[in-house]
Amino acid sequence: MSKYDPKPTPDATMAEAPLDRLSRAANLRRVDIAAASGVGMKSIASLSNGRWATTRLGSLCAIAIALGCAPAELIPELAQRPRSGLLYDRGVFSTKSRKTLGHRSTRGG
């Protein structure tokens, strides 16, 4: 397991994977998703089983487009902002206040 893969919790292992939930709601089989997205069945199965760290971004986007959803709906962890990184190191984001990246005026005044 990669350091980027979230460790499954007892609740997470019992919960239905987002891909399975979305495909069930749309009455789609994995083979239908693979055909519509152009992504292999092995990648679809890995994503469905929670092993998404090795999933290519292009494959994830193709699956999301085929389903008509956002990539973060397939991998909810993508919607969470990390608590460290270059933007935090440079003060763009702080741990105390959740600033958003916005346009800063370069003019004084």
Image (cartoon, rainbow, N blue to C red):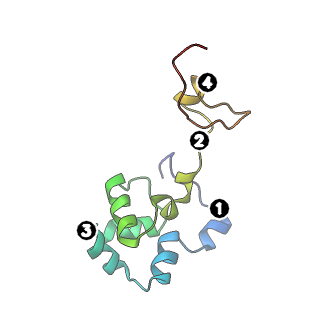
- Which is nearer the eye, 7 or 34? 34
- Find numbered disc 2 in the image and state the secondary structure of the residue it sits on: loop
* Residue at the image position 48 percent from the left and 52 percent from the top: 1
Tag in front: 3 or 1 = 3
Q: Nearer the viewer, residue 61 or 44?
A: 61
The percent coordinates of residue 3 (x first, y second) are 51, 45
Q: Quick one: which residue is furthest to the right in this view?
A: 96
User: Where does residue 67 sit, x and y in percent of width and height?
Assistant: 40, 72
Between disc 3 and disc 1, whose residue precedes? Answer: 1
Residue 84 point in image, percent of width and height: 60, 33
Q: Distance between the Cα atoms at labels 4 and 3?
A: 41 Å
Q: Which kind of residue does numbered mark 2 sit on?
A: Pro
Q: Amino acid at mark 1?
A: Thr
Q: CA distance from mark 2 to mark 4?
A: 14 Å
Farthest residue, direction bottom: 27
Query: Residue at the spot x=45%, y=69% of the render?
Result: 48
The answer to which of marks 4 and 3 sits earlier in the sequence is 3
Real-space Cα separation, disc 1 to disc 2, in angstroms: 19 Å
In what element is the residue under mark 4?
A: loop
Element under label 1? loop
**Pointer 3: what residue?**
38
Residue lying farthest to the top in this orientation = 108
Q: Which tag is nearer the camera, tag 2 or tag 4?
A: 4
Secondary structure under the numbered disc 3 in the rendered image: loop
Residue linked to disc 1 = 9
How would you rate the neighbour count of disc 2 (Cα within 10 Å): few for under 14, some for 14-19, many for 20 or more?
A: few
Residue 55 in the image: above or below residue 18: above
**Circle 3: residue type:** Gly
Compute the Cα span from label 4 to label 1.
33 Å
Identify the residue position indicated by label 4 in the image: 91
